[in-house]
Amino acid sequence: MKFFLDTANLDELKKGASWGIVDGVTTNPSLIAKEGRPLEEQVRMICDIVDGDISAEVVSTEAKSMIEEGRKLSKIHKNIVVKCPLTRDGIMATSALSKDGIRVNVTLCFSPGQALLAAKAGAYIISPFVGRLDDIGFTGMDLIRSITQIYKNYGYKTQVLAASLRSPTHVIDSALAGAHIGTMPFKVLDMLFNHPLTDKGLDQFLKDWGKVFHEAGAAR
Ligand code: G3P
């Protein structure tokens, strides 16, 4: 499973990248706006930190302008994946951009039927939102399970990117469901490291080691 960071924050990206386990980045207009720099500038800086797929989202709502915007975004860096929303215009733009060889991540997917539309339009990535479905009382993970099964049935090449992941359990369940990619906030990536038995075990190893070797050293 590929791990993407769902953030436009450079400090978080630098820290995640230094661990050597970050395969890409997803951004959206809300995440870019939080950092306060123009999209193009922010995305360029992200590309300098992480060498992998970097999703940058269009903000137009009509297919024609989405296509123009998508073409422009794709020229920022070779790793840019253009993100389009799952609307009629977004699917039209996805289809046109994909035909031109531009990789598209179709975002704001909340149903298996929508995911089918994206695959048929030639999307490189589909982004189903797990947490936001949980928020309204559905089991978001069922969506990941359905999409991976449907894509497998027909051999669609579109990668399933589990988005809106809010906890380590979301990441693990997405992996069990066969998602190709999980995108997560830095906080969730960091939480994946934690286990009390790891801390306890390491503490004991170092104590045992210190008792023999430190004391033997001190006796010399
Ligand atoms: O990038 C899209 C998605 O991951 C957003 O997550 O937590 O705002 O629902 P969230």
Image: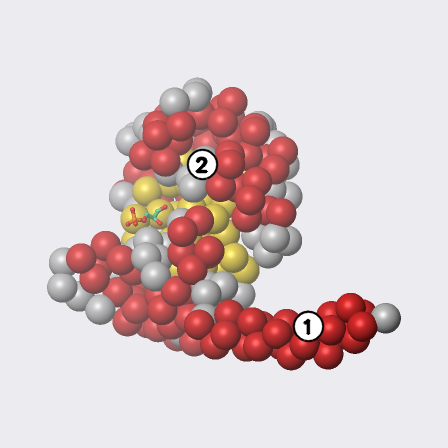
* Residue occupying the far front of the picture: 219
- Label 2 to label 1: alpha-carbon separation: 43 Å
- On screen, 13 above or below 73? below
Left or right: residue 219 compared with residue 8: right
Q: Indicate left or right for 164 with 123 as reference.
A: left
Q: Looking at the picture, tell me which residue is in the foreground, 207 or 37.
A: 207
Q: Position of residue 106 (x, y in %)?
A: 39, 48
Q: Residue at x 50, y 52 (%)?
A: 4
Q: Residue at x 52, y 41 (%)?
A: 13
Provide residue 119's location: percent of width, then percent of height: 42, 57
Query: Is there CB contact under 8 Å for labels 2 and 1?
Result: no
Q: What's the amino acid at mark 1?
A: Gly
Which disc is residue 74 wearing? Answer: none
Instruction: Report which quarter residue 92 is drawn in.
Output: top left
Residue corresponding to mark 1: 210
Q: Residue at x 50, y 74 (%)?
A: 200
Which quadrant is the C terminus positioned in? bottom right
- Along the line of sight, the residue nearer the viewer: 167 or 154: 167
Residue located beneath label 2 in the image: 8
